[in-house]
Image (cartoon, rainbow, N blue to C red):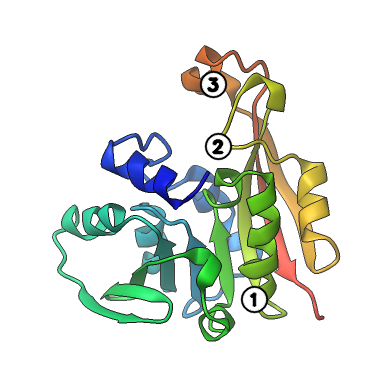
Amino acid sequence: MDAEFWLQRWQEGRTGFHQPHPTPLLERYWDRIGARAGSTVLVPLAGKSHDLDWLAARGHRVIGVELSPLAVQQFFAERGIAPEVHDDSDGIHHRAGSIDLIQGDAFALSDALLAECDLIYDRAALIALPADLRRRYLATVYAGLRPGCRGLLITLAYPEHEKAGPPFSVDAGEVAQLFGGQWGRDLLECKDILADQPGFQADGVTALTTSAWRLLRLDA
């Protein structure tokens, strides 16, 4: 799986991962992570998510990162907004109000940009990546966030032999393994959602849960 895979998905309109509303687990648990208004939140693999608007409305500066130029264009076009555009080493910034949506590679973000982020919201990044890239993602994006950074992570878990991702199964054991001793983790919710996911049922998946995790970057 490479960048071309995701670019093609957007070009072909195969974006079933996009939701027409903010994520319910975000609405339910964001206040539980200790996020302060005015803080900067990083949203990797942001797509054109309504979660960006929701976070901005809560008083945050939002930095989204998205590989697909089409997704970035659609985000602003669907809202009737003409963003200010400039580029730097992190990618092409599209800024409007408190939202800065960067067309670029989340794996190549600068240390300086990551150091700006007080918070991270990860609904569709970790579970979008196969196992080898998940490890690299933790070793680059998450490793660059400073001690005290707080986050909300949303994962899915299902019998891996029953479906080829994405989205990929990331169970509690893998979360513990990936985040190790660098991040404190609290499970806020684990819920069976198979009955609400006809696509997974059609693929023959027999069990499906979603989990919300509160994260805290510990001192090095």
Q: CA distance from mark 3 to mark 2?
A: 10 Å
Q: Outermost residue, right direction?
A: 181
Per the image, label 2 sits on a secondary structure element best described as: loop
Question: What residue lies at 53% left-to-right and 83% top-to-bottom?
Answer: 116
Is residue 74 shown to the viewer in this render?
Answer: yes
Name the amino acid type tagged 3. Answer: Phe
Is label 3 in contact with label 1 (beta carbons under 8 Å)? no
On screen, 67 above or below 18? Answer: below
- Residue 4 pos. (x, y %): 40, 48
Q: Which residue is mark 1?
A: 145
Q: How far apart are labels 3 and 1 at the CA level?
A: 34 Å
In this rendering, would 32 be left or right of 98?
right
Q: Which residue is mark 3?
A: 200
Badge 2 amino acid: Pro
* First reached walking from the N terminus: tag 1 or tag 2: 1
| 58 or 10: nearer the viewer | 10
